[in-house]
């Protein structure tokens, strides 16, 4: 296992930072997913645990975020812990010229584990190197957002389970802004750990997947198809992973509209071109405005639209990481209790 | 009972959204108030409960608010639950074109119940229709703020208890900006569920109560008096409900000052014109600046000034709604424990 | 003991406000420090307590702050309590003309104790006078920040313990902006309660310690040295307390740079001029930018650099104050439990 401690040495999960998907080998990922599976009944409120009663999460979001921040906080609460939090930058000593080293030394004394987002690439690792407690990277600019990559892969695994397929042998189409989209880069890197994957990369030429990522997939022995046509390329895939086409990437609004029109999926396109049980994923948020909706609202009743299960899985994966890093994964079942309040049977 | 679920069907409280005062029939309100009564010893820290231990409130304030937000959060904490929270709009995916439907699908997975404020009328109901957990409306623009209306009526009921009077037969004067004031509209609608109420509406003509509200009161058989004179109309009422005159509603500062001067209540006016035990209410905040103070600070030692008890009651009403919606109202007493820390005997 | 209640009367700690260091006599400080000592194993996660389970802290920061806010919240969480919080001013009714009296009456109903920061001097005391629960001053503008002063003195006491010295007989150099620096003023006042202290005040003449503070030290019988030279004056002290030289205090950047250069401490200066075990303190944040670093990063491995232990001690002191004010200091050991999660053995 290559999960590393602050000195860059290999250690097991307890006490480790989770900074990058490059830390994970395939069996590490399987460990995380196995623990995430065990978290499902707690996230569904079928039972509850207080295994982290008394523990404190420092939920340090130096860049605003509602859902990722709350997903981390909720995951920690579901394990019984408490959350201290910051949102945004202005009130921080970082803005007054304090080094990340000092900030990390001070803030890491306040909690048992830290989830951190920061706009600057590399900042979370720099913070972690001075932190006295494990740090989970919640996104450091254009660099990494490892929990998103893990929840994407976990979603693929869970969605395929009922279909008699697995990540080995997966066929996936990635669609949209593949050049700047952090999630498709990370997912591609994780897929390199698996076997015989077919990856169809559908994007405008201006927004095509960086060559280094494509090379990585090919070096892993995967079959990579590159195209700027949607319909002909989503016929034989298990997963359609859609992302947003951002208009600011194009020289004119007209050009942006051409591409957005070409990569839009609605129920009619799905029925006509996809396999009947092709899974639809998206990292969210999807833009619901008429000129930009890459996934039309008429898909919302399609049972293969997995975008909200995908978001839900983020809680499971984050619970699993907290449990592994704080070394309580094997104590959860013993502490399980029935839930005494209304849960809606979800 | 007309409390509705997401399909608009009648259900009991457990699992229901609380979106509008129009959901409530008189016996529903009595149910809420009976539970609120039971919450008083917990809010006064005479005992404590952990009945919602492990439950999470999503306190989603897409419009900033300190006191309503904290009142909801405090109410949930007093029942033993934890709170995840957002304040303001900027960091939200809503600002990036995400639909309320998507936001609701994602965020509602993180908590067991949601309290939500949003600047746009109807937005909370739209959110609720996609939410997987019950949603309590914490104010949606000019539309509804049902917990404020309930706490106002609950305050009237409690204040009158010691005076041998009740909401049936109530005499109340509403004063100030009756045109735009959301609280007086909602309170008037709730009063239509009761009998033989006398409502004195005191405002500048420009800020008079909307005709539809006045009609509703008259259809309920209530006695409605409309006036723009304060002193002669507050003589024979049980409750004086004061609201702010907002200067921006008038063509000139001079005109605003005329009206503000005419509707200002201080101890001298109270003594001269009111019954000796007339209750004074206000939705707060009251403007303490000299040119605007509708309730003078010299009333602060008047025992009939109920404005802070009114704010306190918000915690009781919100505790009651949480307990009803999450179906733990009848489990609270069994979980009661003594409070081991200093409470000030409040 | 002169800790005061809302009527200014002397009371014991339980239920008291903590507004100013002038409330404390020497034996009060010793009481706080004795309780803080007992908090250390909880802050180090050697054991945990839930003594404030069910209690709510209102962490009211009307002026943004990350570390002081989180330090208060963390201290309360470590005692088992929950935290409701506000950050910044804009969303507050205070901005709409509400008096601090009203704000205090309303907000103090939501919690069992309040920690408050506000940009206006005197505002926290004004708030406290209307509050129904104890208020801890977390900083009111240029006025007071008593928990910082207490943690500074507590740090001095703990650092000296292993050196066979004590606050009586202490030799301390205060360096930098002594005119505007709130922390050095407060620390000087606290030192007046002790015996035979030598205080070396090193600053540019423009930023020298106010005469009233110097007088107070001399009246206490202390030996005060005033200088604008660093090296010759840090030779024989137990503590070097460095603060930031702020460039905006000088007429030109050049002049600021002269002084900053003269008061900068790095490992070379430390080795050359200080005793081998002189303790280095700083209220943080220290400015790490090249033109301003009063304490160079090359000191970070010097075991006598106490600046992070100093920040850590803030949690202990705040835990102690909460425990004293809420009267649970003697109940903590009975409620102690082992910590079941990974703690890193810190």
Image (tube, coloured by chain):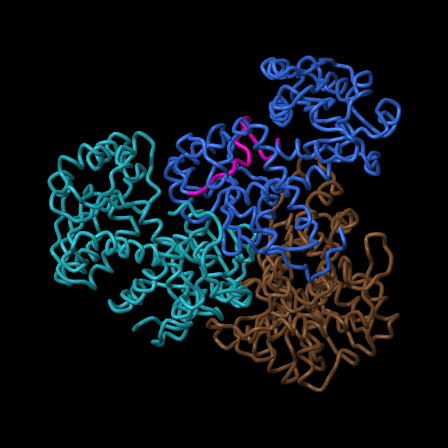
Chain colours: A brown, B cyan, C blue
Question: Vertically, is B141 above or below A315?
Answer: above
Q: Residue B138 or C331: which is nearer the viewer?
A: C331
Residue B311 on the magenta span = no
Residue A229 visible in this rendered orientation of the protein = no
Q: Residue B187 or B157: which is nearer the viewer?
A: B157
Q: Residue B251 at what x, y percent from top left?
A: 27, 35
Residue A122 visible in this rendered orientation of the protein = yes
Residue at image location 28% in from the left, 31% down from the top: B253
Question: Vertically, is A16 above or below B232?
Answer: below
**Relative to residue C85, is residue A330 drawn left or right?**
right
Q: Residue C107 or B39: which is nearer the viewer?
A: B39
Q: Residue A161 at what x, y percent from top left?
A: 69, 82
**Relative to residue A317, is residue C133 drawn left or right?**
left
Question: Vertically, is B277 above or below C280?
Answer: below
Q: Residue A210 at what x, y percent from top left?
A: 79, 61
Q: Residue B144 or A103: which is nearer the viewer?
A: A103
Q: Residue C271 at what x, y percent from top left?
A: 88, 27
Total labels drawn: 0
Magenta stretch bounds: C133-149
Residue at image location 77% in from the left, 70% down from the top: A29
Within the image, what quadrant is residue A234 found in? bottom right
Taking the view exactly as shown, the residue that stands out farthest to the bottom is: A164
**Relative to residue B230, is residue A125 drawn left or right?**
right
């Amino acid at each position: 296992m290559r999960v590393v401690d602050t000195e860059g040495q290999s250690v097991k999960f307890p006490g480790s930072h989770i900074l990058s998907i490059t830390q994970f080998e395939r069996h590490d990922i399987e460990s995380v997913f196995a623990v995430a599976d065990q978290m499902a009944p707690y996230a569904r409120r079928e039972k509850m645990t207080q295994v982290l009663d008394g523990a404190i999460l420092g939920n340090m979001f130096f860049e605003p975020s509602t859902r990722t921040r709350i997903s981390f906080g909720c995951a920690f609460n579901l394990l019984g812990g408490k959350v201290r939090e910051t949102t945004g930058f202005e009130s921080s000593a970082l803005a007054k010229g304090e080094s990340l080293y000092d900030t990390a030394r001070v803030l890491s004394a306040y909690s048992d584990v830290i989830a951190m987002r920061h706009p600057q690439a590399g900042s979370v690792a720099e913070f972690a190197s001075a932190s006295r407690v494990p740090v989970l990277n919640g996104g450091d600019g254009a660099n990494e957002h490892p929990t998103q990559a893990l929840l994407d892969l976990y979603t693929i695994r869970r969605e395929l389970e009922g279909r008699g397929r697995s990540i080995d042998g997966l066929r996936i189409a990635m669609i949209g802004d593949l050049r700047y989209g952090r999630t498709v880069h990370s997912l591609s890197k994780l897929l390199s750990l698996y076997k015989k994957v077919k990856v169809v990369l559908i994007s405008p030429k201006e927004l095509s997947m960086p060559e280094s990522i494509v090379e990585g997939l090919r070096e892993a022995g995967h079959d990579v198809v590159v195209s700027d046509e949607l319909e002909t390329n989503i016929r034989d895939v298990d997963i359609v992973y859609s992302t947003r086409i951002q208009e600011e990437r194009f020289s004119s609004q007209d050009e942006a509209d051409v591409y957005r029109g070409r990569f839009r999926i609605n129920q009619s396109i799905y029925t006509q071109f996809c396999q009947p049980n092709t899974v639809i994923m998206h990292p969210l948020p999807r833009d619901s405005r008429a000129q930009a909706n890459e996934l039309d609202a008429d898909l919302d009743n399609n049972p293969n639209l997995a975008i909200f299960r995908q978001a839900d899985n983020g809680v499971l994966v984050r619970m699993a990481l907290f449990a592994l890093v704080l070394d309580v994964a094997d104590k959860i079942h013993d502490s399980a209790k029935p839930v005494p309040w209304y849960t809606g049977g979800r």
